[in-house]
Amino acid sequence: MAEAVKVKKLKSKKTAKPKIREHVADSTAGPESLLDSAKQLVSEAVIQQFEGVSEASTDITLDTQASIDDRRNSDLKANASVYNDKSAATQDLVETFADPKLKVLKLMRGPSNQLEEKIAPSAPCHSMAFQIPSAPLPTAVSSEDVNLKTNESLISQKSACEVQESNTAISPCTSSIALPEIMTTLPSDIQIEEFTLPQVQAFQSQIGSVKSINASVADAFQYAMKDENTTHSSALKVRETEQSKVEGRLCTMIPKSVEVQVLKPFTEAQLQSFYYNTELERNEATIEDFLQRYAFENLQNHELYELLMNYYRAKSQLKAAEEDLQVLEREHRRLLNLMWTSTDHSITIKGTCRDNTKITAKHSYTRVELNDDGYHALEEDLKKIRGQVHETLALHMYSVQLSHLQVESYLHRLFNSYVPLQNITQNAPVQFTSTRSQPCMDATAIEHFRTCISILFVMQRRPITDEGFLSITRGWLAQLVGALLRIATLNDHLFILNHVLRCPLGFGDWASAFVQVTPATGWQGHSPESIDHCLTVLSTILAHPRAREDYLSHMRNMEAGDETGQSKLWVMLDSEGEEEEDGSQVLFAMAENDVMALLNQFQLNDIFCFAFSMSGAGDAEFMYDIHKTTEQGMLKLFALASCVLTIFCHGLTTFHRRQYKQLNKRIGWLICEVVQYVSDHWSNFKDSRVVSHCTLMPRLQTEFDSFFFKATSCLLSAKRLGAWQFMADLSYACLSADAVWHLVYTLHTSGTECTDPSQEEDIQEITWRLQDEDMMHQLTDKLQLMPQQEAIYLLTAFSNIIISREESEDVLTDIIVSEIYEVSFIDVVTRDFCSKSGRDILSAIAEKQLSVVSLLLHKIKKSVHQIGMMALTLFNEMPLLLWQPTTDDMQLIAEWMLKAELSSAENQLARLILSNMNWNENECGELFLPVDLHREVAILITETYSKHIPENRQGLFYYSIQQLYNVSALLRVTPAHEQQLYSWAWDLIHRLCLHAHSQPISAQPRAKSEPIAAPASESCDRWEEFLNSIPQLHTTLQLRTVANLVRDDGVFASFVALAMTNLGHDRAEFLNAGLGLLLRLVHNQQFLGSVYVLHLVTPFFFDNPSCLSTSEGFLSAVKAISSAEQTYTKMARDLFAPDFPGKILKMFSAMILNQLEHHSASPHNVIKFWLSVFSSIQNWYQDRNMLYLMDNLIAIAVSQPGAMSHVEFTFCDMYKSMSEGGGVTPSRVGSFLSWFSSSGSNLPTLIDKSSLPEFPYVAYSVLSVEECLESGLWKALQTELAHNATASVETCLKKASSAVKVNSPSAGRLCIYRWAQQALDTHMQHPLLPLLWQKFFALYLQRLPEQLGLPGRSGNGQRFFQSMLNSAYMKKLKKRLKETAQLYSKLATARDSIAANEDDVLVTPSLSNTSIKDAYQPSTATCDQLYMVFSAYLLWMDEPRLHDLSLYLPALPDQYHAELLVQIFQAEQKAWLQFIDYSSIEHMLSQLDDVWQAHFNATPQAKLGRYTYPANDHISTATSRILEKLKLSNPSLSAPSVALIKAPVPAITASVISDENSLMSAVRGDLELLVECAKCVLL
């Protein structure tokens, strides 16, 4: 048996490459020589690769080397005859080699010691001819192991054949591999055909018998033409010229992993074949011609230059004369003060009055004396001033004026000399032509015009401080440049630009408009020459202007100072306070603002509009169509964008000094914009093409990666750019996977030079390096040396790489997330400034890839002692609302909850995670997390609660903990850990969806309260299925801990049992055992939990309320919950700060509302159930808390159509029981109030007060029922008042009571007074107020009924308010109606100007603690309607004629609303529901529902809104980003306007001189000016 050898993996796999490359390089033309080289090459490659089999990833058992060599030599000799002829040689060559691009042959491993490959006779197939070039073949061997996809599978780089120690047969399997490309051409007579995967599989049946071996790996070479347009995945087969040779074998032993060529990106020279800028290449020659032609030496002898210098000298002399005159004037003012000498004198006079009183008077005065010397000096000075003005100053002013006229005359002649300049209109556009369009515009004329412009530019480069001269010359320059731009060629634009770039500092303020890069309408429809010119201008701006120092040589004397001796230069200092550069360098270097001004003239958007073949210009919408771009167009785009990047990179190199910091940032943003444009367009291109149909897609992806790396290298190479902020804003979504790995590795290593992905770097090796701890330390050290802001930008760049990639790249995600976590929270140095930013970055990554949350969770497990409490800060920002934990995650959380101390970071982190998870439903109406996870967490919380908080039967411990927590919250003191756990456990258990009725409505089973049509209905089956899935408390294994705690009177476990098990889902179980657990919760002060249990359990009894309304235990629980906050502490606090209703009471009422809105039962059933329960509680009408619950319940009934009938029926039934005593116990009857306790029939009442202002809904319902019961007494009273016109109401009431045989009540208990009092006490904005007043007026304006055929009589309403006491009461009613009408009038006219005090804002008793900010404000239409009705009420109150029977209603004004009066007069009892402000009721109920949602809702919607987006919102796409950037371009400065120079002196022709009138008209203005000057001289 053959001897076996065992080999091990080596680190390097490149031993065979040098020889292979050497053989290929030595290959020459010709089939025979090529064949010999190929045979030798194959032999050596097989030997070398086989010797390298020791580098395999697993141990492989092979035959001895000797047997392998013998077998290889025998195979080569056996096939030697095949190589004799040309066709056979070529066929063998094709069998031997394989092209990595055209995929691979399929290999079969069978039960033999040797691999055989047999190619079956081929079917008809496609063929391709190949030719052998005369030049030597290039090498094409790569150094990287690349795995290629086949049609069946993807070969893993780490896969290897396992060692088989026995001789058992190995089942056949297939594998595919691609071998190095050895040669790129084949002999011309070789025919290569393709076959499909089924044909390849058919080869297996034709493979002969082979001997078995223990384990061997064999791969077949194949070779095909290297063509970018061929991307087939099928294998290649060769049609041999001699069919008898088909059975020949080629047996080789090759390692599993072989190397494949990496596609190289195009070089700069190759890219120029897609885009070549001829103008940019000629730009250097253009600049050289400019420098030679327009040098100062060639311009100083020009006539215009002499005129300008004369003008400048005249201006200088005038300025000197003016300065001399100013000196004389100052001397004049000094001598004027010396001409007179003043002295102060005083005289004192004394005298006596007639009354002998002595008086004294003093007079002060100033004496002025002429100074002769001063007078003569002043006289001389005045003579000098007159001489200076009349002789010197006048002469220089004349010279200035004359010189100015000479220059203007010259310019005027210049314009008149060229006809095209005279024909330019003021609104003519700027021209961008390659050649001159005017045939008459000869080159000499244009050259003269450009020379004049150059001379004007020369004047701007002189050290002139006369701002007036500079302003005038710049005006002339703008006129000439504006005219030239209207007839300009592209060379003229470069001519102007070169002049501007060689102007002194500050030219951006006055000369930037001279540079016009693109037309006002953009480049749509223009030729590529326009784009060439645009990039040429950009390149010229961002390059250092040649010979700028020579052009500014006249400015050198400004270093020492200007003519006034003051320097205008700033001294540049470095960070150490030393002078950075000398003055000359600062002078000759361009200012940052100047370059920015020129750069603003460049519109990057126009270039890409042209590159994208977009239409639309000016204000028109851009039309973007990706289908206009072909594969060739994408290559052109990459070439064009690469050219732009090169220009920007040269700009960063040119302006690398510290003084260009903002300019560098601007260039950096432009680079990012270029990358974004190309990335978005490339993304659209890939989305619009089918990859399998696009033959150039690999090439295009390679070019895009290369382009991206050029941009990255450009940014990172800038010294003062601060490149990391730009790297953080780049989009990495379109990069290939290999390119991303190279980029990440580059950012980790140098950070100053970007490695191109085409370089031969093993991705696996890069992955190993990135996972190395040394790389982590290197990154940490790098961040420590960087500025803090730059370090944050680097981390942001890493995060953006991950966010833009697919979730499948989990290895890269793990590496980057681990590094950000390490530097942000573990490293003691970097976490000081990276923790906050790192938290936000990790949160952004986790929002994109939720698996990061689990990754961080397990990393914290390993480093919890290092990170400590910072883990809570980290996970507080994690998107836990979107996270679904795995089993390992929950096991880790459970371990922390049960084993860690409460004060530890692990335990607190576990609680934080569970609190922030999404326990609510998703957008599809289903639970976001499965219900099993809810139950698992509930059991976990129960176990943790029972471990750290001991439970006892008295419940004092719970109560004490709760009170301590409340006190801590009031005092703002951090509660103890047990208190925190207590509050957290109850809050979270309320949010878990454990019960059937806490599930989403779509997932809820049909309640038993709903009628079921048939036993086999779908609803019934669903209900039974859900009941079967409910855990049984005493039989479910997972609930053993809960069952034991329930048996031990555990309060928390009792709640869990009611919410999760059968005790809360079955009527019988609840009445039998569950009700006791509910009472346990109530007795242990767990009122919120009790309310939640009522919310879950009571829907099962909606169809049969009597089961609970007759249960004393249930009623006592409801009573206890409603009075839960009636403690001594609460009563003492209410003395100073009343707080009604409390939290529990609000929650109870909100629970009823939530059942109504979210339960599948009918709303009427919900209302009927709670009416039955509340009315069954003893003395409910005397309990303020129960009145609150009943009032809110009736408010809910008002909002439900038809529900008020249930309220009326309940109260009527209650009054019937009270009156008749039927079915009511004596204790209940004795508890009701009666009007009189004497014998006789009494009319019962539920309101023992005059009104219920806190509970208007209860008052309205009760008074409505009592009014019906009082109808007999009221009719008798009306009759008595009609028969006794003078009798008092009290007297008539006694007679009426006797008539109906009831005890006579007091007059104040009549319904008309009680309705009036209730309306008077109810808030003016209460929704029921219009109905209360309706009830009052229905009695106040009631007409007496017809009796015995007599006509109807007028009403007696005024009789009730005739007494002195009641008349004052009537005034109160009128005042209240007036105030109410005024309030709604104010709200109708100025809805937003509600009074600031609380009395003007609706604060209903149900929400008495509602802030003014959240108060309801009615709509304008509602205010108008209510103002109308209350104004009518006021008119009814003041109008006595309404009580007169003879009143004709149609005659009343519209303000009386006669239609309402008709209803009252006809005694209609229908409520005016149209005047109820239902929006106010809905607002109150919504606030009530918010109270419930804030505590029991699984996920607050406000927090969830951070991660969810509406479906209709605009989602940013590549196309939308392109169009948005095109619209946001900043407009550039327009060219100088065209203003033709007028003749400074009108032309004097012979006709003017010969005509007297014409002559006088021409000289009249000048003569008048001379006369005025003469008059001034005489004066």
Image: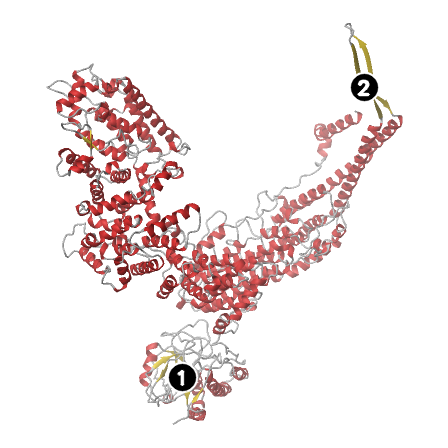
Q: Nearer the viewer, residue 696 or 1339?
A: 1339
Helix, strand or loop at mark 1: loop
Q: Is residue 1570 above or below residue 1051?
A: above
For residue 715, which quarter of the picture? bottom right
1389 lies left or right of 492: left
Q: Nearer the viewer, residue 1162 or 182?
A: 1162
1390 lies left or right of 711: left
13 lies left or right of 1076: right
Q: Residues within 10 Å of mark 2 (few under 14, many from 20)?
A: few
Q: Is residue 1267 above or below residue 687?
A: above
Return the residue at label 2: 365
Residue at 56% over, 52% down: 518
Split into 4 quadrants, where in the image is the C terminus? top right
Helix, strand or loop at mark 2: strand
Q: Does label 2 or label 1 sit earlier along the sequence?
A: 1
Please state the horizontal and vertical placement of residue 1038, each as a whole percent of the image.
Answer: 27, 63
Which amino acid, mark 1?
Val
For residue 544, which quarter of the picture? bottom right
